[in-house]
Amino acid sequence: MARGSPIPPMLRRKIVEQYQKGVSQRKIAKSLKLSSSTVHNIIQRFRESGTISVPKGQGRKTILDARDLRALRWYCITYSNATVMEIRTWAQEYFQKTLSVNTIHRAIRRCRLKLYRSKKKPYLNMIQKRRCFLWAKAHLKWTVAKWKTVLWSDESKFEVLFGKLGRHVIRTKEDKDNPSCYQCSVQKPESLMVWGCMSACGMGSLHIWKGTINAERYIQVLEQHLHPSRRRLFQGRPCIFQHDNASPHTASITSWLRSRRIRVLKWPACSPDLSPIENIWCIIKRKMRQRRPKTVEQLEACIRQEWDNIPIPKLEQLVSSVPRCLQMVIKRRGGATQW
């Protein structure tokens, strides 16, 4: 039993039954994994009153009653980004009571709420939301078969992971300055830039290099990998090429694609949640955190291995979810979706 939690009536009944059979209090406490004082108090109450129920009014009175909790729940839901200190300041002024941070934490749990780390999403202004909303409405009629003709592409940065990555460490209070309990970080770790493409038919080519990407390098990557990926994945069938509005994808890239007669999917700004290849990057980065390559060479080998291990049913599932993402964008009036 957790410390401070009430003893269930069934467990109190077992204690009394064993006591009536002549079992000692120490053996009862050991068999039921309870403290000796708890067993003694329940048996003493049974001797005096002949009942196992707890009398009303026992225990410490709560500082906030049910009405206060309803007001606190309303404030927490209305101002969901408020800190615990801000909630405490408001509660002390509203309830005219002296409250501690621990009291606020317990009250939030009693309101059936919990403090979570907020998800990071790209910032969208009103114009970008409007354009994303119109883009989703324009492509809502596309079928899953139509989305399977899209060749998705994107770039992502992978870093070599150093040291212990966990946010928590199990230690005593005195071990806070023990070097084994530190979380060490590197200021500028070695990294690789990765370009890749995929479709519902399978994984396309992968290009890895050091440094940043610019328009000239991006054209070289497309010249080397775009046409082989199209031929291998679509086998001569028409397809639509997709890339985002990153700065290297400038007007020179548009003219290069137009000269090769490559059909390009128009893409709204700041909308990575609509591209299935972003989920592929998340899967591979999660695998990298598990494998923890120590050098750049190991990192590149792991990326290529995990890239080839992505199953085709997973790709079909991600591409088939695009219509649902569009419906979510329309529902949120162009806002970020779950991804």
Image (cartoon, rainbow, N blue to C red):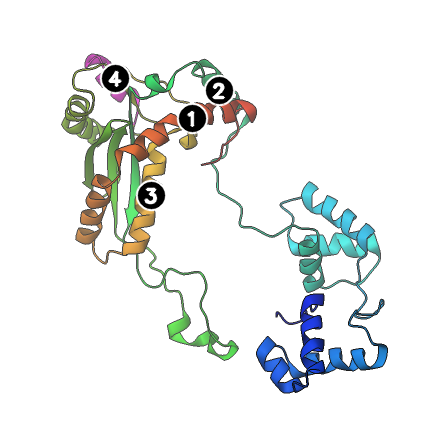
Compare residues 308 and 76 and report the one nearer the observer: 308
CA–CA distance between discs 3 and 2?
Answer: 29 Å
Nearer to us: label 1 or label 4? 4
Q: Secondary structure at mark 1?
A: loop
Disc 2 target residue: 131
**Mark 1 or mark 3, earlier in chain:** 1
What kind of element bears circle 4?
Answer: loop
Q: CA distance from mark 2 to mark 4?
A: 24 Å
Residue 283 is tagged as 3
Q: Which residues are magenta?
A: 249-262
Residue 91 x %, y %: 77, 54
Residue 247 seen: no
Q: Earlier in the sequence, mark 1 or mark 2?
A: 2
- Classify residue 67 as left or right of residue 327: right
The residues tagged by marks 1 and 4 sit, at their Cα atoms, a distance apart of 22 Å
Residue type pointed to by label 1: Ala
Residue 269, which numbered label? 1
The residue shown at (35%, 27%) is: 319
Q: Which residue is mark 4?
A: 239
